[in-house]
Structures are given as structure tokens and as C-alpha cells.
Image: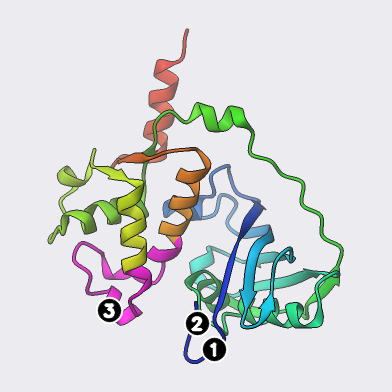
């Protein structure tokens, strides 16, 4: 990826995060923070990556973030930590990427809601996390709720206006989601707001949401998801109803 003449860059790796809200993170489901504010720790390990001619393979970094209210309301504070083993070139690349200086919706969005950035700290970072085989095997089917999957269902059907009856229950194969991700990420924000089926208000964040959805499907071995107009509480109630007495 490159932006406005910036060096081309890419990264593939793992992310581990935790926040002070209820499990599932309300901001992923268009809800306000559980306790009124948001604080989180996110750590990253780049398995394969580069920034121009600088390799980013094996680089680890983390972010400690805090917002006084919902993330989208801004006024956030962030402390970035880069593993001390990173070279000076790698440190500079990570710091500039995190600040959104070289494109990438994920980095640009979070940079836009920060009011204060502390100087980067260089310290040892160790990540010990594993997605167990039992969790993967348990995902026999996937029901997707909230704005990202419903938007994709509307885009795939070119719905104008939005029709919840045609969205609910709509199947989305992983291949179709990947195709739409490529299409959306290749467009500027001005072009994205004109995509049929996509609400203009979702144009700034839709790519990040689709990337997350793709990674979740891959992690759980899902080839297809079913889109639901119901929210996550409906799923919890359904699961409870199916549980043995």
C-alpha cells in the first residue's frame, strides 16, 4: 500500500487486544462504551512486512489508548510502544504508520480520533496468545450482524434504497467478501460514498470492518456467512433457547 507518494508498505501478522468494555467490544456493534469511556491495549506482531526497502518481519509494537467517551467522538490519548529489538529504520517506519502518515484506513482512522500522542517508548514486548483448535472446530456456521456485513449484503445486491428484508438471511461467500474488499479499498473516500448499497456514513470505516470480517472468517474456517438484521442479543437468546435444560 502507498499513499500520496509515500513508500509502498505492507504487513501481515497477528493482533491481540483487550479493552474495558463488555466482551465483544460495543464499538464493533455501533454501541456506546460499556462504562462511558474506552481504554484498551493492542499488541501487534508482523509476520511478513515491509516499508519501502525496510523489512518489518518480526517487528512487534503495541498501543495503550484512552478516550473520555466513545472512540468516534475523539479526544483520545495514545502511548505507542515499539519492541526494543527493532532497528532505527523499523522504529521510524512503525511510528509514522501508526500516526497515519502513509495511508491505510486502520491507521488513519485511529490517528484522526487522537488529541494527544506521547513520545514512543522502546521496551521488550512478548506476545503469548493462541487460537485453539477447539475454537476453530466449533465454528460450523457463521451469522454476521451489524453494519459491515449488512452493508456488504446491500452492496452485493446493489440495493438502492436499502431493503432489510433482502439483507436479512443473505449468504455472503468469503470470495465475494474478498472481491468487495479489493473494490472498496481501491477507491478514494469520495468514490466510496457513491458505491451503490453503501451508506455514505460508513464509507470512512467500511474497509477496516471488511478486513476484520475476513480475518475472523479465516480464523474460524468459515467459507460463507449468513447476514442477519438482528443484533447480537438475538443470537445470545437463540443460543440460550437451544441449550439443554
Residue 231 among magenta residues: no
In the picture, the disc for residue 178 is none
In the picture, the disc for residue 191 is 3
In this view, the mark in front (1 or 3): 1
Residue at the spot 63% in from the left edge and 68% down from the top edge: 49
Residue 184 % position (x, y): 33, 68
Q: Which residues are magenta?
A: 184-208
Helix, strand or loop at disc 1? loop
Residue at the spot 60% in from the left edge and 76% down from the top edge: 114
Tell me: 243 left or right of 227: right
The residue identified by callout 1 is: 6
Residue 10 occupies quadrant? bottom right
Density class for disc 3 (Cα within 10 Å; few <14, some 14-19, many ≥20) is few
Residue 50 occupies quadrant? bottom right
Identify the image's colour scheme: rainbow, by chain, secondary structure or one colour: rainbow
Residue at the spot 61% in from the left edge and 66% down from the top edge: 68
Helix, strand or loop at disc 2? loop
The residue identified by callout 2 is: 2
- 102 versus 15 height, above or below: below
Residue 21 % position (x, y): 60, 49
Amino acid at each position: 500500500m502507498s499513499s500520496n507518494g509515500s513508500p509502498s508498505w505492507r504487513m501481515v501478522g497477528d493482533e491481540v487486544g483487550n479493552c474495558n468494555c463488555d466482551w465483544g467490544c460495543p464499538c464493533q456493534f455501533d454501541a456506546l462504551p460499556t462504562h462511558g469511556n474506552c481504554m484498551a491495549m493492542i499488541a501487534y506482531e508482523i509476520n511478513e512486512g515491509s516499508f519501502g526497502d525496510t523489512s518489518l518481519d518480526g517487528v512487534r509494537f503495541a498501543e495503550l489508548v484512552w478516550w473520555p467517551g466513545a472512540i468516534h467522538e475523539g479526544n483520545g490519548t495514545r502511548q505507542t510502544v515499539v519492541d526494543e529489538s527493532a532497528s532505527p529504520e523499523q522504529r521510524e517506519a512503525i511510528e509514522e504508520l501508526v500516526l497515519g502518515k502513509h495511508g491505510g484506513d486502520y491507521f488513519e482512522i485511529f490517528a484522526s480520533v487522537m488529541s494527544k500522542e506521547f513520545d514512543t517508548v522502546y521496551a521488550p514486548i512478548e506476545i503469548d496468545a493462541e487460537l485453539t483448535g477447539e475454537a476453530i472446530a466449533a465454528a460450523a456456521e457463521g451469522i454476521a450482524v451489524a453494519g459491515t456485513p449488512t452493508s456488504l449484503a446491500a452492496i452485493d445486491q446493489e440495493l438502492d434504497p436499502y431493503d432489510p428484508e433482502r439483507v436479512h438471511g443473505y449468504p455472503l461467500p468469503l470470495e465475494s467478501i474478498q472481491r468487495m474488499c479489493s473494490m472498496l479499498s481501491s477507491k478514494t473516500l469520495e468514490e466510496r460514498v457513491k458505491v451503490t448499497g453503501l451508506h455514505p456514513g460508513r464509507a470512512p470505516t467500511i474497509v477496516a470492518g471488511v478486513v476484520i470480517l475476513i480475518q475472523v472468517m479465516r480464523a474460524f474456517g468459515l467459507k460463507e456467512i449468513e447476514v442477519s438484521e438482528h443484533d447480537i442479543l438475538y443470537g445470545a437468546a437463540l443460543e440460550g433457547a437451544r441449550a439443554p435444560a
